[in-house]
Structures are given as structure tokens and as C-alpha cells.
Image (cartoon, rainbow, N blue to C red):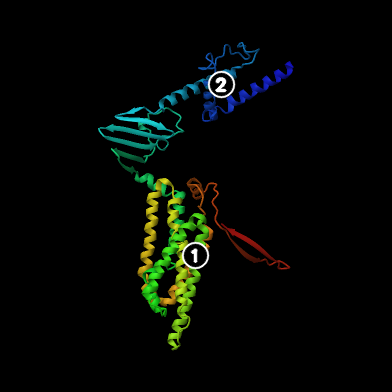
């Protein structure tokens, strides 16, 4: 039995020597000292302040057993005592004061709140302490000069029952946050979403509905049809709001993209035939078809295009830049509206009306590929899951994938064909 004990002691002594000689520097930066600090807090009264060794010879006897401590362990104990003292000093230096000038200071996790009451007004300032102090700093520092970046402050001023709230943001911090992938990627997704949506012809059709009906050979009063079209658009919007809560973003977008593309291409085909009939003095037939195509286009567009991108503005951006990125996205959307509406007469004169609507239909069908590949499904996902997806971290959000096949012919003796499957996500 004594042989087993001696072998165990030799193993412990050898391990301690190896740690001391080779990894002292790594121990300084590791979490071992923090663990020992917490362990030290749970020691009894006789040993909680330091680790004491009565003797330290090559093999010493401290009263807890025969020849169990070595000189190496004495050095290790001194090092740990120094770490405990440094941790106590750092903890003491990094505490938040309860009073700062005329403000009362309170700490809730990482949120620091400064509050001051004067007469009937209450001023409250809130910021995140983790945004300002380096948690990896090893040496005790003066917190007053330890700001590593400028935090964003939320300020609330309350007078009676009225509260005025505003935020103080620093330009450099905002620009830095905007350039992060979790802000740029969703902006690109929505930027092209609105580009495809507007250039599928929705606002061109809305603004020039009367002229379009007149030039397409519809025999019914164009103004009456336009009014009915507005009613259909309203009812479709209500239906879209209901479907948005029950269906995902991707299915509704795909329905809109495919439906708008087919309707525009069909309408373009009818316009081509209508021009052909006019040139050859043939009585136009199926004059109800333009109404069918335009109404089907309006319903398909409203179900997805009209609702989904605006909903996603409030979902995909991080909280810190949601306001400014939402504003930039909205600006882009209305810029596309302006470009489509102002360029529509020019397009009609340049590539004719049926060519213009053919272009709108092709853009919409091309958008189907884009939406299938890049548009994430955000329904029933938390904001953190959405941010993780755009940051490149693991996330449960899914998009589609496209598979292409390419045949490569090798100049071998038998000239066999080999197929390679390339998957693009």
C-alpha cells in the first residue's frame, strides 16, 4: 500500500515541476487563478487568506502528512497567493460607485443607470458598461480614463406624466456597426428585394393604370376599372396581413415573384397581338384578358411584395443600427419607385409597351431565383437567431440552394464522360 502512495506522490511532484518550469507564463493568463480565487473564498478561517507552508525542504513535513510538500509546491503556493491578491485589488478597483456627482448610480448586469431628480424633473441616463471597459485588462487601471470606445447613451427626462426620450450615438461607433456583416448583409438582401419588387412594374402599373387600360384595347370604362383595381388591392393587402402571420416570408415572396412574372409576360403577349391586330385592321379579340392579367398581377404582387420587405426591415437589423439602416433601406425603396415611375414613359417610347411589360416580367421571374437562393426565412425566429445567421454563426435560418451540372469530356482512350455536381448555397 505504501508503494502505491509513494508512486502517486512521485507523479504529483513531477507534474508540479513540469507546470512550474514550462507553463508559468501561460498560467498567468489562464482562468486557473480565478478558479483558485473562488476556491480560496470557500476555505476555512485559518486558510482563507493564504496558503501556508510550515517548512520547505526538498521533502518537508507541515503536519498534514509525512513528506508531502516540495520546494516546487512552495513556489506554486506563493504564485497563487500573489494571484489572489491581484484579483482582490482588481475587483476593488473595478466596482461601480454608488454616487457620481449629483447622479445616483445603479448597476443591473452590464447596464449602468445614472439618475438625478431636480424639482419635478427626473433625468435618467443609461449605457452599457461592457461597451466601455476592457474586461481582459490585467492591471488595475483608473476607470475614469479607461474608456476604450464611446458608448451610446439613452436619455429619459420625465416631468410629471410626460417623458422625453432620446439617444446619443457616436458617429464612429455607428459607422463601425454599419460596416459589420450583420448589418451589411441584410441591407444587401433587402436592397435587391426592393429593386426587383419595384422593377417588376408595380408602381408603374398603379400610376399609369388609366393610360394602360386605354392602350390595351379594354372596352370597359378605364376609370371604373382603376377604382375596382384599388378595391382589389385593398382586399389583397388585408389578406396578405393575415397570410404573413400564418405563412413564411419565403413562400409568399415566391408566390409574388412567380405570379407577377407570369402575369406581366402574359399581358405583354396580349399587347403584342393587339398591336398586330391594329396594324392589320383586325377586330381585337379577348379584350377582357388585359383586365385579367392586371388584376392577377395586382393580387400576386400584394400578397408578398407589398408586405414582406417592409416587415423584414424590423426583423433583420441589429438593434444598434436598426433605425439608420431601416432609413437607408426605405430611402432605397422610394428611390426605385421614383426611377420606375419617371422612366416608364421613356421605356414605352423606346422599347414599346409590350417590350416594357416583358422586361418587367423577366425581372420578376429572375427575382424568383434570387429570393430562393438568398432570402432567409425569418418567421418564428428570434432576433438573436437572425443576427447569428447574418453574422455567419450557427443559426436555424434556412435558404435554398441551386444545383448546376457541368459535363467535362476527358481525352482518354475510351473518352468517357464524367459529371460534376456543383452546389451553390
Callout in the foreground (2, 1): 1
The residue nearer to you, when weighing 386 against 157, is 157
Q: Is residue 232 above or below residue 102?
A: below
Q: In this view, does 258 lie above or below 5?
A: below
* Residue 207 placement (x, y as % from top left): 36, 69
Helix, strand or loop at label 1? It is helix
* Residue 183 placement (x, y as % from top left): 44, 50
Q: Which residue is at a point 51% across and 55% down the rendered structure image?
A: 246
* Residue 234 placement (x, y as % from top left): 41, 63
The residue nearer to you, when weighing 273 against 220, is 220
Cα–Cα gap, marks 2 and 1: 69 Å
Residue bearing mark 2? 76
Classify residue 100 as left or right of residue 422: left
Q: Can residue 207 be seen in this view?
A: yes
* Residue 171 placement (x, y as % from top left): 35, 46
Q: Which residue is at a point 49% across and 58% down the rendered structure image?
A: 243
Residue bearing mark 1? 257
Q: Which residue is at a point 43% across and 89% down the rendered structure image?
A: 281
Classify residue 333 as left or right of residue 40: left
Q: Which of pointers 2 and 1 lies earlier in the amino acid sequence?
A: 2
Displayed quadrant of residue 165: top left
Quadrant that contains the C terminus: bottom right
Amino acid at each position: 500500500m505504501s508503494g502505491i502512495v509513494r508512486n502517486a506522490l512521485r507523479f504529483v511532484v513531477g507534474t508540479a515541476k513540469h507546470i512550474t518550469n514550462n507553463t508559468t507564463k501561460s498560467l498567468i493568463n489562464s482562468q486557473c487563478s480565478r478558479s483558485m480565487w473562488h476556491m480560496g473564498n470557500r476555505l476555512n478561517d485559518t486558510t482563507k487568506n493564504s496558503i501556508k507552508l510550515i517548512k520547505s525542504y526538498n521533502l518537508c513535513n507541515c503536519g498534514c502528512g509525512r513528506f508531502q510538500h516540495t520546494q516546487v509546491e512552495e513556489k506554486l503556493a506563493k504564485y497563487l497567493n500573489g494571484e489572489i491578491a491581484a484579483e482582490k485589488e482588481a475587483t476593488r478597483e473595478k466596482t461601480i460607485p454608488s454616487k457620481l456627482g449629483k447622479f445616483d448610480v445603479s448597476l443591473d448586469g452590464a447596464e449602468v443607470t445614472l439618475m438625478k431628480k431636480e424639482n419635478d424633473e427626473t433625468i435618467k441616463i443609461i449605457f452599457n458598461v461592457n461597451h466601455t471597459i476592457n474586461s481582459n485588462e490585467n492591471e488595475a487601471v483608473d476607470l475614469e480614463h479607461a474608456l476604450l470606445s464611446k458608448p451610446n447613451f439613452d436619455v429619459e427626462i420625465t416631468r410629471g406624466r410626460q417623458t422625453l426620450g432620446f439617444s446619443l450615438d457616436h458617429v464612429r461607433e455607428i459607422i463601425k456597426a454599419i460596416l459589420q456583416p450583420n448589418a451589411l448583409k441584410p441591407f444587401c438582401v433587402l436592397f435587391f428585394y426592393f429593386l426587383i419588387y419595384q422593377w417588376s412594374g408595380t408602381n408603374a402599373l398603379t400610376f399609369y393604370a388609366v393610360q394602360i387600360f386605354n392602350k390595351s384595347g379594354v372596352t370597359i370604362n378605364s376609370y371604373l376599372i382603376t377604382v375596382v383595381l384599388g378595391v382589389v388591392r385593398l382586399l389583397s393587402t388585408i389578406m396578405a396581413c393575415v397570410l404573413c402571420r400564418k405563412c413564411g416570408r419565403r413562400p409568399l415572396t415566391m408566390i409574388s415573384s412567380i405570379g407577377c412574372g407570369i402575369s406581366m409576360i402574359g399581358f405583354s403577349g396580349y399587347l403584342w397581338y393587339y398591336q398586330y391586330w391594329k396594324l392589320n385592321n383586325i377586330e381585337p379579340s379577348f379584350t377582357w384578358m388585359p383586365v385579367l392579367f392586371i388584376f392577377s398581377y395586382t393580387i400576386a404582387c400584394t400578397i408578398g411584395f407589398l408586405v414582406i420587405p417592409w416587415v423584414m426591415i424590423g426583423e433583420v437589423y441589429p438593434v444598434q443600427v436598426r433605425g439608420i439602416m431601416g432609413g437607408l433601406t426605405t430611402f432605397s425603396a422610394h428611390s426605385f419607385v421614383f426611377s420606375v415611375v419617371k422612366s416608364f414613359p421613356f421605356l414605352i417610347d423606346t422599347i414599346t409597351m409590350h417590350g416594357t411589360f416583358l422586361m418587367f416580367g423577366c425581372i420578376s421571374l429572375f427575382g424568383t431565383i434570387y429570393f430562393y437562393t438568398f432570402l432567409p426565412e425569418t418567421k418564428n425566429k428570434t432576433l438573436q437567431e437572425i443576427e447569428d445567421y447574418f453574422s455567419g454563426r450557427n443559426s436555424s435560418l434556412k435558404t435554398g440552394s441551386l444545383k448546376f451540372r457541368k459535363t467535362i469530356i476527358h481525352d482518354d482512350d475510351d473518352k468517357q464522360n464524367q459529371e460534376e455536381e456543383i452546389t451553390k448555397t
